[in-house]
Image (cartoon, grey):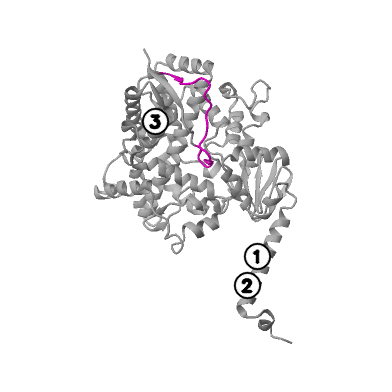
Amino acid sequence: MLPVTQLFGSSTALACYSFLLIFVALKLRQFLALRHIPGPFLASLTDFWFLYVMRLGDYKKQSLELHNKYGPLVRYGPNRVLFSDVEAISVVYGTKAPFQKARSYDVITPYINGKLVPSLITLRDEREVSAIKRHISHAFSNTAILDYEHHIDHTIQSLVKALQANGPELDLSDWLGYFAFDTLCRIGFSDDTEMTARGEDVGNTLLATRTRNHHWDRWLALPALESFWFKNRYLSGGMKADPLTNLAKQRFQARVDQGGAASTHHDLLDRYFQAQQKSPELFDNRRIVALIVTIINAGSETTGSSLAVAYYYILKHPHVYARIKQEIDEAGLSFPPQFRDVVKLKYVEACIKESMRVRATSQGPMERVVPPEGMTISGVFIAPGTVVAANKSASTLDPRIYDPSGKHPVHEYIPERWLGVDPSRTAQMDLASLPFSYGKRTCLGIHLAWCEMLKCLTAMFMRFDVDLKDRSFELEIEKGMIALVTPKGLPVIIKPRA
């Protein structure tokens, strides 16, 4: 009998055949494990189908069509399942036993000082996430927000002055982007880039952050290929730091030169240095820079875009605009309005929540990995190791949650649906829309974002009369922006109130 190596030609060939056999076996096992989940046939064979859908640039429309065709569970990859069942959200994203984040988050891991440094968004080790949060969660509490409020007030004053100088016709979405970025820079390290004052994207920093988010959209379907192609120093020379990372590094070094934790500032960098003193191994210099980059990158884009979308829907509905102005005028607010006062403006809050429901600023799948015991969604068993994700575009249109009375159609912008409902129902509505994720991975900056949005929107309507430049204008989103949606523009006519 011939030796095995001769039978296959060589030991190298044997290794290749063995690898191919194992690969095929694993893929077959994966295919069979989810064969009972409906979906496009090509999606069951390759993740390139999902890559194609993401690159079409209209994930929301495509994902809704999938659910309309296949039901509450859709297989959108060989090992991926999309669900619209709201009851499963609290299980997948909850606090008791949160599912691990999938590899798709690796795509946006920041590159700092020649090394990839996972941020709170991209970290997949839940124990490490818990350790980090134990040291810094207090920096994002409602009490801490009051300590940062003067930073928000400073940027609001700068925005009002800039709009007075550059009106009456302008693109409001640009200015809100500048406002959100400068605000978070000031909260992060007590300084800003003067985008708001100058009315421009200084150093193309905003463009760089949007490019980074767009990269995530394009490659989250194939994180392993993205890592091989873009993070391989032999193929691409490795990733280079973007302008935001460089900005954060510069401000970090400046604070170190001022004494680090010994200096006194009312900002996040202060809190991070304090955490470093308590746990230097967990909070090395790279980690601190990564935390600053994350809060500014994710927070500024979502806040600026959420404000632009909210303004659009308010201006598009004159009766909403009239009611929101009435609520603000009758509140007798100081200027800039203070957080303790704007949190009482329930209609303003409802307008923002409704805009985030109708046009979420983050539409992509928040992928998680099913644990070893598996799980059941909509009465169907999902095998361990499967990547699952809630489809917010579908859950936010669930009439059982958003229109139980039949008076508030889910496809329409109706802020009143959020008013006069009991707390448990409000919690369910918040859960279905997932504006700040949920459970253990709820966005740390949720209170900060609400403070910014409530104060900015209220301040603007206190100082200006605003209208769409063209009443027939329809808001469009930058093509391909899915993880963090960016409006193409919001042309308005803005005039100081008498």
- Give the CA separation, mark 3 to mark 1: 51 Å
* Residue 285 lies in the magenta stretch: no
Split into 4 quadrants, where in the image is the C terminus?
top left
The residue carrying pointer 1 sits among few (fewer than 14), some (14 to 19) or many (20 or more) residues within 10 Å by Cα, namely: few
Q: Is residue 48 left or right of residue 319?
A: right
- Amino acid type assigned to the residue bearing label 1 in the image: Phe
Measured as percent of width and height from the top left, residue 285 is found at 35, 54
Q: What secondary structure is found at the residue carrying circle 1?
A: helix
Report whether 36 appears left or right of 278. Answer: right
Residue in the picture at 24% in, 47% down? 258
Residue 214 drawn at (x, y percent): 49, 45
Mark 3 and mark 1 in contact? Answer it, CB < 8 Å.
no
Nearest to the observer: residue 26 or residue 419: 26
Q: In the shown orientation, is residue 158 left or right of residue 74?
A: left
Q: Nearer the viewer, residue 347 or 157?
A: 157
The image shows residue 216, relative to residue 281, as above or below, that is: above
Which is in the foreground here, disc 1 or disc 2? Answer: 2
Q: Tell me which label, 3 or 2, sits earlier in the chain.
A: 2
Badge count: 3
Separation of residues labelled 1 and 2 (CA atoms) = 10 Å
Q: Name the residue tied to disc 2.
A: 16
Q: Earlier in the sequence, mark 1 or mark 2?
A: 2
The residue labelled by disc 3 is 175
Bounds of the magenta segment: 465-485
In the image, what residue type sits under mark 3?
Answer: Trp
Could you say whether the residue bearing mark 3 is in a helix, strand or loop? helix
User: Could you tell me which secondary element the residue under label 2 belongs to?
Assistant: helix
Mark 2 belongs to which amino acid? Cys
Q: Residue furthest bottom?
A: 1
Q: Which mark is residue 23?
A: 1
| Image mark for residue 103 | none
